[in-house]
Image (cartoon, grey):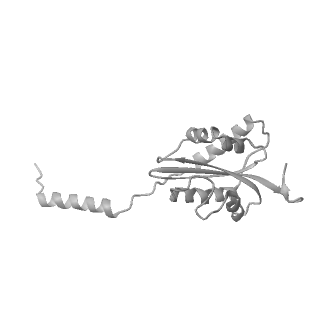
Amino acid sequence: MMIEFRPSVVALAAISAATAAIVLPAPAAQADNKRLNDGVIANVYTVARQAGCRTELKNDPRLRQAAQWHTQDVLNNRNLSADIGSDGSTPQDRAAAAGYQGTVAETVAINPALAISGIELIRQWYYNPDYLAIMQNCRNVAIGVWSENSLDRSVVVAVYGQPVDSAANRPRP
């Protein structure tokens, strides 16, 4: 048995598909980046250890929040590529707004693709002298990492912290 399609039905289907492609927005890339984020922390820990650091690197939710804010800002504002946010905020401003007291630094990775691997990310940071110095700074004992993706851009931000010694209100040695 052979099914015949009338030209009008085929044309209607083609027009409907074309209209849907034009009218409906492209879906955002949704992914669970927890494994990538945890891997970034592990890789930064390794870089710090290789530099002679003996302190533990603790995942801090306040720094993660600051990293999330900047990741989303960089993902949605193509003219951003570093530490300054679209509102003029600095890593220190965002960390303070998230409730973190202490000195912070930040590393940002942008990949013009749907995803970024941990190896690509560490390669970007390792061969950037400023970012390598941040990762190797033994005073950075807290970290927050966030990453997000769109169909043509992946952004990863790590915010590193040096907690304040509450007794003296200064960074701990």
* Quadrant in the rendering for residue 84: bottom right
Residue 128 lies, with reference to residue 152, above or below; the image says: above
Q: Residue furthest top?
A: 50
Q: Nearer the viewer, residue 139 or 45?
A: 139
x then y, percent, for residue 32: 53, 51
Side of 68 where 49 appears, left or right: right
Q: Name the residue: 79% across, 47% down.
A: 139
x then y, percent, for residue 173: 85, 48
* Quadrant in the rendering for residue 17: bottom left
Side of 19 where 78 appears, left or right: right
Q: How many marks?
A: 0
x then y, percent, for residue 102: 78, 57
x then y, percent, for residue 20: 30, 62
Residue 111 lies, with reference to residue 87, above or below; the image says: above
Side of 4 where 54 appears, left or right: right
Q: Nearer the viewer, residue 85 or 149?
A: 85
Q: Name the residue: 65% across, 59% down.
A: 65
